[in-house]
Structures are given as C-alpha cells and as structure tokens.
Image: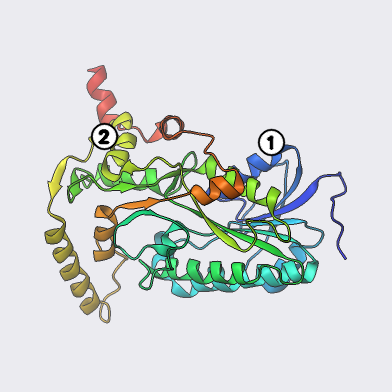
Amino acid sequence: MVSTRSSVGKTKCLVTGGAGFLGKHLVEKLLASGKYEVVVFDIRDNGDPRVATIVGDLRDAQQVEDALAGVDVVFHCATAAPAAANTANKTLMHDVNVKGTQNIIEGCVTQGITKLVYTSSASVVFDGKDLFNVDEETPYAKNPIDFYTETKILGEKLVLSSNNRSGLTTVALRPSGIFGEHDPLLVPTIVANAKKGKMKFIIGSGKNLMDFTYVGNVAQAHLLAADLLAPGAKCAGKAYFITNADPQPFWRFLGDFLEPLGYARPSKKLPWRLIFAIAVIVQFIISLLKPFKEVPPSEFTPMRIRIAKANRQLDCSRAKADLGYIPEVSIKDALDRTVKHFAHLRNPEEDSKKSS
C-alpha cells in the first residue's frame, strides 16, 4: 500500500502534461498553495527546478504505472491536441487521449491512488449547433466536431465510469476556450492569420457568444476539485463545465487580442451560408486530390465555419455549487495579462507608422 503523504509532509501529486500550457499554470497553482509536492509526467522536461519531472509516454502502461508510485492525487491534463501535424494523426490522438487515459486509470488502481482529476473539454457536447446556457445534463455530441473531441468523449467516459473503482474517486472538468499566458494556439494563430490578411472578416452576424476561460481559472478549478474529492463527495463521478461565466461576442473577443497588438479587428461581414458552401466544395476537391497528392490539413473546413458562427454558452452553476468555483481572474484582467505576455507578437508595421 502506498503512503498517503510524501516525505516532506505534503500531498504528493502527479501532473500529466505538466510541461504544457495548462499544465504549467496548474503546477504554479499547486506550488503556490503550499500543500503539494509536485511531480510532472510529460514527453518533455517541465524545466522548473522546483518540481521533479519524469519524461515518459502515456502510451506506455509500465512507464505510467511506475510514475504513479507513491502518488496521492493525479491531475490528468495531458492530451494530443488537433494542432499542426496532429490534425490528421488519428492514431496518435486515440492512443494518447483514450488508451493513455486508460493507462492512467489502471495505474491509479494498481498504486492505490484515491483521487483523479481529469481535464476534459466543453466541446464534448458540441456538434456545431448553437448552445444556449446548457448544463451538464446535456448529452454527449452524437456528431462530434472533430476526431479529437471524439477521443475526449471516450476519455471522459472512461474516467467517470471508474469512480469508486478500488477506492478511486474521479471528476472531469470541461473548460471552454482556454486562453492566457504561454497559450500555444489561440493568440499565435489569430496573429499569424492577421499577418496573412485573414482576420479582416466576420463570418455571420458577429453576434454569436462564446464562453472563454482564463487558464489560471481552469487551474484553480482543478485544485478545488482535488480538495473535495473523496468517496461520497458531491463532485465524485461527475463532470463540470468551467468557464469565466462571462460569455463574449466571439469575433469581438478575437479583436480584443488583435487591436492592442497593432492589428485590425475583424470587421467585414460575410454570409456564413455562402462561406460554408465554399468550404464544402474546397473539402471535396481536397478529398479528390488526396490519393494523388499529399495535401496539408486545411483550416478552411465546413466544421470550422460552423464553429465560427455558433453560439456556445455554458452554465457552470454546478461547478459553483459543488466545487465553490468562482473565477479568480476576470475576462478583462485576463485579456490584459495575455496581451502583455504576447507583446513580442506586436505588429512591427504599426510601430513603424507611429515612429515616422
């Protein structure tokens, strides 16, 4: 039987994906709490001398089991996201997000661990149609927006169905639209597209609202869930939407990043049905070319057009009631922090205009 406390008198936790975007913020929160001894499990070194890093692969069950020895709490944040080369790599996403999650669960059971906090995604209920203040009673999407989301649904089901298995308690957190310092996706992507002139346009009316979440608030929710997890706890075996509880107009929000960095806000409205039809044609042409020519993954897909014009509003009342979750950082403050962090992406042409 493993010890319930680390050698330094603190709760020992393992953060999978602790060298990644959310993982690093979570590690900071855990260390700042003063309650945890932190171990990171990732395919690369976390680089923080305050924590121990185990470089390993979630797909290797033995590596996972060995890393979990002596651990009290597991924060499973690691994921193979649909970015860059991963977009078309379904095998990688399934092996990491589904099989890797099963390896974590089996390792927890073998090592006698009692708490598992899983990072899911709000997209598990999104199939491209509008969501208006939906709660956790909303069923999983029958037609997930992409293969990544399909694997997150499967991973969440594995975690929640393992609650009360051999003393293990589990909870799944579903953040929506994570952003913040060190974000590898949202801000770098929209800035890169702005440089190419692709961020001038609004698809649809521009009035669609989406729940975004500051990464530090997502990390905060993980600590709250870990504190409360126990056999019979309200949160055990449940999923929770985690947002800033402040839905933003999707296109205006993107502009709130771009404008302070010296790029124009999206302003020219395009009819979404026309753009959707064009995207369908483009995807059809790509499917015809694939057998003869290697075609890189396209951002211009029918599903991405649906995402850009859809309302995605989520009710996180259950997280407030059961976890005591109140976002610590407001959208405004989070935007300010994020823009400041990405000052190096500022438009040099805009600065040269001001100096001339």
Left-right relation of 21 to 237: left
**Dividing the picture into quarters, in which one does residue 140 lie?**
bottom left
Which percent across, then down, holds residue 51? 72, 45
Nearer to us: label 1 or label 2: 1
Q: For the point 69% across and 56% down, which residue is it? A: 233
Residues at marks 1 and 2 touching, judged by CB atoms closer than 8 Å: no
Secondary structure, mark 2, is loop
Look at the picture and state if 156 lies above or below 53. below
Image quarter hosting the C terminus: top left
In the displayed orientation, state which residue is furthest to the top.
356
Which residue occupies the foreground of this view, 39 or 241? 241
Q: Earlier in the sequence, mark 1 or mark 2?
A: 1
Look at the picture and state if 95 lies above or below 67. below
Which percent across, then down, holds residue 29? 64, 40
Secondary structure, mark 1, is helix
| Residue on which disc 2 sits | 263
Q: What amino acid type should be assigned to the residue bearing mark 2?
A: Tyr
Asked whether residue 82 is in view, the answer is: no
Look at the picture and state if 142 lies above or below 192. below
| Residue on which disc 1 sits | 32
CA separation in Å, label 1 and label 2: 36 Å
Q: Which mark is residue 24?
A: none
Left-right relation of 207 to 35: left
Which percent across, then down, holds residue 293? 26, 76
Asked whether residue 213 is in view, the answer is: yes
Which residue occupies the foreground of this view, 315 or 91? 315
Q: For the point 32% across and 45% down, which residue is it? A: 190
Image quarter hosting the N terminus: bottom right
Q: For the point 61% across and 72% down, which residue is it? A: 161
**Dividing the picture into quarters, in which one does residue 289 lie?**
bottom left
**Dividing the picture into quarters, in which one does residue 147 lie?**
bottom left
